[in-house]
Image: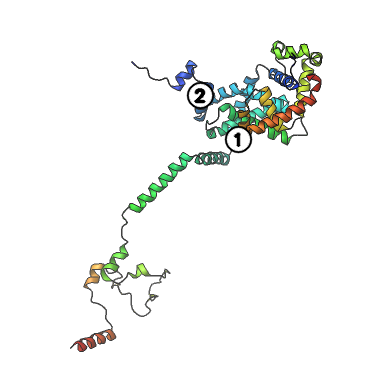
Amino acid sequence: MALAPATPAQRMTDGALSEKEQDLLLVERARTGDTTAFDSLVLKYTPRLFTTVYNLTANREDTFDLLQDVFACAYRKLPQFRGESGFHTWLHTIAVRTAINFLRRSRRRRTTSLEEMNSAIEQDPDYRDLAVNSTPVREAGLNELQEQLNAALQKLPESQRAVVVMFDIQGMPHADIGRILGISTGTVRSRLFYAHRQLQALLSDYLK
Amino acid sequence: MNSQPNPEEKLQRLLRLKRYEHPPEDFAEIFLEKFQRRQRSEILRRSTWSILGERFANFMQLLRRPAVLWTAGGAYAAVLLTLWLLPRPAPPGSTAIFLTGVPDPAAVNVDSRPVSPGARPVNSPTAPVPDAIPGGKRRTSSQDQDKEPIIGPEEREREEDGRLHDL
């Protein structure tokens, strides 16, 4: 006897759904007024969006407030989400645009704050390699290195900083970044090129 | 062979280290709690106009979808076709015109000003209303058929002249 195909809800409980399908299911439930479904999306995407927004603003309190705005905006705009791109990309688009608008508005009155580094960094092969082969990195220590990296990132224009954060820190592909910022892949590459050139000059001591 | 990474690669490795910057462990839970409180207070604070405005914006967004446009267009065309195909009932005044050849003054009266009782009709300053009968009732089409045609003295003379001419 042929078995009936499993419904998306059954497949979700079985863990057989892809991440995109799981998101779409939660979005559908949230659209019908299921607030717990939207809460699941908030819990899932807060850490990822935190990394993006924090690296754009370099301030923990601003990041917290901006993320509140981002999720409130996403909840209001949920009926407009068509599912053509993933929910992750859609949410990132709102987050990056909200953060860039905030940075443009408050250029003069901003302060930076440091977020704690996860202790797992000590085990990272890249860090160990840099610490062994680069004297300035070894001597600087983690906190100073973190401060220098933040300061260098903050000197970039917002449009270039957003590309660096998404490509180098978040590891997103060029196509996704282009979709989020509403620019072509060529523009993404060119912004990355100019941003890297500027960062190399600012962080030259650590790149010897 | 030189295995030292170039500055570009070194820079990318340095930037990748920023992935280890994380918020505290309970950040997501605290964040969610505040978000829920904010949502509740926003719902209570919002005016009817802002809710209506948002719903209208969402509706307009929905209208941009081609499927919705096609459906709306199809429904509009169907309504127009139905209205065009429906048999139209003839207006009551047109029956009187067909039977008597004399149009109903009420149907053709261009002057729609109210007429005071006892005042003369505007269209015929001397003669009374042709289809009015004593008692204030209007003639029906069957009464019109029984009625003798109204012929003036000049027309009567012309008729008699015509008969003489024929002889």
Q: Tell us which disc is closer to us: 2 or 1.
A: 2
Give the residue displayed 70% in from the left and 25% down from the top: A54
Quadrant of residue B146 in the image? bottom left
Q: What is the three-letter code of the residue carrying label 2? A: Glu
Q: Quadrant of the N terminus of chain A?
A: top left
Disc 2 chain ID? A
Foreground of the two, A148 or B155: A148
User: With respect to residue A160, does B96 lie above or below?
Assistant: below
Q: Which residue is mark 2?
A: A21
Q: Quadrant of the C terminus of chain A?
A: top right
User: With respect to residue A5, does A185 lie above or below?
Assistant: below
Whether the residues at callouts 2 and 1 have beta carbons within 8 Å, the answer is: no
Query: Which element type, helix, strand or loop, lies under badge 2?
Result: helix
Q: CA distance from mark 2 to mark 1?
A: 34 Å
Point out residue A197 in the picture as x, y percentages from the top left corner. 75, 28
Give the residue displayed 77% in from the left and 15% down from the top: A142
Q: Is residue B93 left or right of residue B110?
A: left
- Residues packed near mark 2 inside 10 Å, few (<14), some (14 to 19) or many (20 plus): some
- Residues packed near mark 1 inside 10 Å, few (<14), some (14 to 19) or many (20 plus): few
